[in-house]
Image (tube, grey):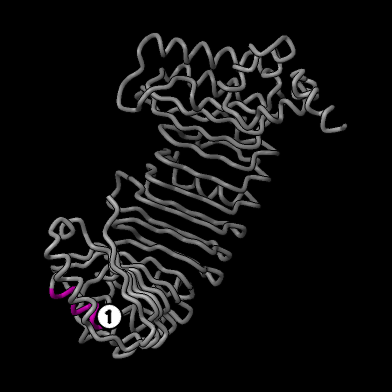
Amino acid sequence: MSSLGNLRRIKKGVDHISNLPDTVLCYILSFLTTKSAVKTSILSKRWKHVWTKVPALDFTEIVNISTDRQLSLEEKICLKDCIDKVLLHNDASYVQRFCLDVMDVDAFYVNSWLIAASRREMHEINIALNVKTLNVLCLPPRFLLSEKLTVLKLQGPISISASASFHLPNLEIIHLSKFKFPDDEFMKRLSSSCLVLRELHIVNCCVKATICVESLSLKSLIIRKTRTSQEKVSFAVKTPNLTYLVLDEFWVSVDIGEMRSLNEAEVNFFVNDFQVKELLSKVSGVKYLHLKSEALLTSRELPVFPNLIWLKCHAEKKLSKPLHCAPKLKSLIILYFNENSPFDPKFAPERLPCLESVEICSFCGNEEELNMIAYFLKAATALKEMKIIFDCCITSDVTTVLSVCQELLDIPRSSAVCQVKISKTDL
């Protein structure tokens, strides 16, 4: 009988969702973009003003366009009117998420939107700009004096005043991309003032001459491709509790403190041999390491990596160095074979007793690559899997592929359980 009653209620089309309290409806709508939330106003009189109380301002799909063309005049007017209307009528004093992702818009309008949005207390700020301006937009100071802010992501021609004050006691995540640093002390002041900061990304940013990061709470740090008018960028990093580090730079000067908790690192830099040795000694306790070519080319010797079990690198003459310095290595990924400076097994360890997995990417089937594979199959006595991914330059010739595959399968293996798996590069 109860099942029959439920069926009748469903047939009547009872709108249970509209009967929910405003707080619940606003919470549900906060997971949508603002454009989608505003659309609910046409559902019924009950929904007409619900969107004005939603604690989220997500302007990420106001105008549907591809990124390879400019906005038409009509689209610009639509975008401006829509954002103006929302910021005027939304009266939520606390915003869970503020996202502004716009392109080809006058900087004057963007600045007015940022000022209007900054009057609210926020939990997450995500701003991505591609706007027409000769000057860098300055972030309103109110954004930097927030008790509740936990996430700050800025991308585009944005900066912060050199005289700005910071009060961000709960800020945990900072992502800066194409951001302009106001001075050399900026990052030091920002990072040291965020007492619970755990993740910091600095990617393709414009700096004066120095990046200084100091934080006791920081766990993850990524610094990639910074730009400067100086000859090189100097880095000073004091983050003793860091567990993840990416340093992908060129022509840098590095001063790094102790990182005893570091578990994973990716390093790519071009500096003198002394600095390479010093930096690698600071990351020598990691278990997972992505070591790019420049770091190997400029180093005469490497420190021992006593805990390293996973290594990603290029196959070149100096690959033998990390193989000698990683006695516990279990997994090796080779991204590219350098034909100009090929890996020579004569300088590599005779045995790799802990190595269980090898992956060779962009395999072209030349003799030097086959010799390298033969070396690993012989030296790795505990090898379980050898995965070889063919490059697209060879997969178009079926006859050549079959011949090379047969050569690979005929290579002797020291490990009785080793499986050789062959695949092609995904295009």
Q: Nearer the viewer, residue 133 or 382?
A: 382
Q: Is residue 29 above or below residue 172?
A: above
Q: Residue at x 59, y 52 (%)?
A: 192
Question: Looking at the rendering, which quadrant does residue 170 occupy?
Answer: top right
Q: Looking at this rendering, what residue extends furthest in the right direction?
A: 1
Label 1 crowd bin: few (<14), some (14–19), many (20+), radius 10 Å: some
Which percent across, then down, holds residue 250?
30, 56
Q: Is residue 323 above or below residue 47?
A: below
The answer to whether residue 274 is visible is no
Question: Looking at the rendering, which quadrant does residue 135 occupy?
Answer: top left
Question: Looking at the rendering, which quadrant does residue 251 occupy?
Answer: bottom left
Q: Residue at x 50, y 27 (%)?
A: 60
Q: Is residue 78 above or below residue 391?
A: above
Which percent across, then down, holds residue 395?
18, 58
Total numbered badges shown on the rendered structure: 1
Q: Residue at x 34, y 24 (%)?
A: 134
Which percent across, then down, holds residue 274?
32, 73
Q: Nearer the viewer, residue 116 or 95?
A: 95
Which percent across, then down, holds residue 165?
60, 38
Q: Which residue is labeled 1 in the image?
A: 320
> In terms of secondary structure, where does tag 1 sit?
helix
| Drawn side of residue 266 relative to residue 379, left or right | right
Q: Residue at x 54, y 61 (%)?
A: 239
| Residue 310 within the magenta-colored segment of the rendering | no
Q: Nearer the viewer, residue 20 or 16?
A: 16
Q: Is residue 94 above or below residue 77?
A: below
Task: Characterize the magenta stretch by its predominant secondary structure.
Answer: helix
- Three-letter amino acid code of the residue under disc 1: Ser
The residues colored magenta run: 367-375
| Drawn side of residue 205 relative to residue 413, left or right | right
The answer to whether residue 302 is visible is yes
